[in-house]
């Protein structure tokens, strides 16, 4: 039977009334999928086009894969360093880029393509009717993207970066243990939030390969004690250490340069070849056994050394020197130390292995000596200091050798300023010894990056004197007003906790400050799968 023409629109209207809501729902769902698919393609293309222009500082971390890490590594910058304020998290207030306008990628008119999409949507309606209640779970499963383990790690780091940026504009979070504040910090609120995010997120994988004493062991009772204490602490750490490398943000190479020098180096040979070969072989072992070193060419790996030859040994493997985070006492920028990826490690001379009787000193009113130094002719700076000031002024007490019966530590406790000239290497244990005893450190060095200087404002609690100004030392120190000296003294006392060695470690002490410095550099590094 033939239907009248006016009946056809009426039947079509009934069809849409009956199937209208589900049909509309699936049509919107399909268009959303189509838009998301095109958006992802557009985003991928945009990332590829802009990959060579990304910067290292928050909120845009350096995106790294094994093919581009060497070029991108040079762009990585410290988060809290005031010298890179244009890229620093502390100065970052610009809004994120706007999202892609998905309407621009949909077909603008009803063409054959539109009809094909309509037909596909109708087919999905039919499938849903035939599948019954199983349709919705299947649709949700198709919507969900399966994220890799690395993507989940990077998502957590993005959240940490956002929290640190927000902390600069909010009230400081509460902390029952310690709340950093004052001019000793470049940005106390950002540092505090970053530290808290580290406690929530950071996981470190320690490679178990290698045998003591060259690996997993180090000195804890001499001038290189920072090296041994850290290795021991990280090996015993149950909070930050993980046994699953797929959950790790950074990977620690547990080698000891002090032990390599003691057991591998041929005395007085001046030949670094045995040291370099040992380290290169170790990196080759972990690179062969695990995929993580080759994934980033070592950019998310770190080594730690307080020995003078730490920088030299790091040259054993080119990627270890160029890409990896090197935690070094010998933080000399003229010898390749890069503050944007490397960490300055405080040199601490623990002669007995503990700090008992070492911390604290008298009040400022009981410190009669203006400036003090005692030490041998070691390096190019100290001879100038000795020649200029030894036994020539009662206010500036400079000695190559202390008189018999005079305590070195007691002399520091009696002094307002402690002179800390570099030796053959830029670092000096006197800096931390001065902080321990409440004596304001006077840094006399070239090309030295003080420890934790991306967080700590050293100018607020120390004095920097150039080598050329050694003859003017008394004039410079005497020119600091009593009011300013008292401020600096209080600040030295306040930052002391960041340099204290505790066993077991305590929050905000030197062990955790080292970890935080590594954490900052990992935040500045974005990783992605191939």
Image (spheres, helix red, strand yellow):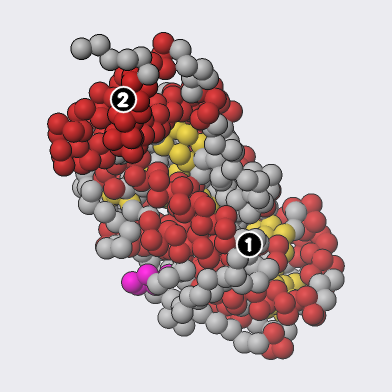
Q: Quadrant of the N terminus?
A: top left
> Vertically, is 195 above or below 468?
below
Q: Is residue 363 above or below residue 308?
A: below
Name the quarter where the C terminus is drawn: top left
In the image, which residues are magenta?
501-505
Check residue 11 in the rendering and tell me which mark sits there, or answer none.
2
Label 2 CA crowd tier, 10 Å (few <14, some 14–19, many 20+): few
Q: Position of residue 106 (x, y in %)?
A: 48, 23
Residue 167, image x, y percentages? 57, 61
Question: Does residue 10 appear anywhere in the picture?
Answer: yes
Q: Main secondary structure of the magenta part?
A: loop
Crowd class of label 1 (few under 14; some 14 to 19; many from 20; radius 10 Å) = few
Instruction: Write down the quadrant of residue 363 in the picture.
Output: bottom right
Specify whether residue 270 is in view: no
- Name the one closer to the observer, 45 or 286: 45
What is the distance, in whole Å, between disc 1 and disc 2 at their CAs? 62 Å
Which of the marked residues, 1 or 2, is nearer the chain's N terminus?
Answer: 2
Per the rendering, the mark at residue 383 is none
Q: Residue at x 47, y 34 (%)?
A: 63
């Amino acid at each position: 039977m033939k239907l009248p023409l006016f009946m056809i629109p009426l039947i079509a209207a009934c069809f849409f009334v009956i199937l209208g809501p589900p049909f509309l729902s699936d049509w919107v769902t399909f268009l959303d999928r189509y838009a998301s698919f095109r958006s992802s393609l557009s985003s991928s293309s945009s990332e590829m086009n802009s990959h060579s222009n990304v910067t290292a500082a928050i909120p845009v971390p350096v995106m790294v894969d094994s093919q581009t890490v060497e070029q991108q590594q040079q762009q990585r910058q410290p988060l809290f360093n005031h010298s890179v304020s244009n890229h620093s998290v502390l100065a970052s207030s610009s809004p994120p880029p706007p999202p892609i306008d998905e309407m621009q990628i949909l077909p603008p008119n009803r063409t054959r393509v539109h009809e094909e999409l309509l037909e596909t949507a109708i087919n999905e309606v039919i499938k849903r009717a035939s599948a019954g209640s199983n349709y919705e779970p299947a649709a949700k499963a198709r919507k969900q993207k399966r994220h890799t383990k690395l993507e989940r790690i990077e998502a957590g780091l993005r959240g940490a970066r956002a929290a640190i940026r927000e902390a600069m504009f909010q009230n400081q979070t509460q902390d029952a243990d310690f709340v950093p504040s004052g001019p000793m910090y470049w940005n106390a609120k950002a540092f505090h939030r970053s530290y808290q995010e580290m406690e929530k997120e950071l996981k470190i994988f320690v490679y178990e390969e290698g045998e003591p004493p060259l690996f997993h062991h180090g000195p804890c009772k001499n001038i290189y004690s920072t090296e041994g204490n850290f290795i021991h602490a990280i090996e015993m750490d149950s909070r930050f250490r993980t046994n699953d490398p797929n959950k790790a943000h950074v990977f620690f190479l547990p080698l000891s340069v002090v032990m390599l020098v003691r057991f591998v180096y041929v005395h007085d040979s001046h030949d670094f070849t045995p040291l370099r070969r040992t380290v290169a072989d170790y990196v080759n072992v972990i690179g062969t056994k695990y995929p993580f070193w080759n994934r980033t060419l070592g950019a998310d790996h770190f080594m730690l050394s307080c020995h003078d030859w730490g920088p030299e040994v790091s040259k054993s493997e080119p990627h270890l020197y160029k890409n990896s985070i090197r935690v070094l006492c010998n933080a000399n920028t003229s010898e390749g130390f890069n503050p944007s990826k490397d960490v300055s490690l405080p040199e601490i001379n623990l002669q007995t292995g503990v700090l008992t009787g070492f911390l604290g000193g008298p009040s400022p009113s009981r410190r009669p000596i203006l400036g003090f130094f005692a030490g041998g002719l070691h390096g190019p700076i100290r001879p100038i200091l000795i020649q200029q000031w030894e036994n020539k002024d009662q206010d500036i007490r400079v000695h190559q050798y202390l008189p018999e019966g005079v305590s070195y530590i007691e002399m520091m406790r009696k002094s307002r300023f402690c002179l800390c000239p570099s030796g053959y290497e830029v670092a000096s244990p006197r800096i931390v010894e001065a902080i321990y005893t409440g004596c304001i450190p006077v840094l006399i060095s070239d090309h030295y990056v003080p420890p934790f200087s991306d967080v700590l404002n050293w100018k607020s609690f120390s004095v920097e004197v150039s080598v050329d100004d050694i003859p003017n030392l008394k004039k410079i120190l005497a020119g600091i007003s009593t009011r300013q000296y008292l401020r600096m003294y209080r600040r030295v006392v306040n930052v002391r906790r960041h340099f204290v060695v505790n066993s077991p470690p305590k929050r905000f002490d030197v062990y955790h400050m080292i970890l935080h410095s590594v954490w900052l550099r990992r935040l500045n590094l974005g990783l992605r799968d191939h």
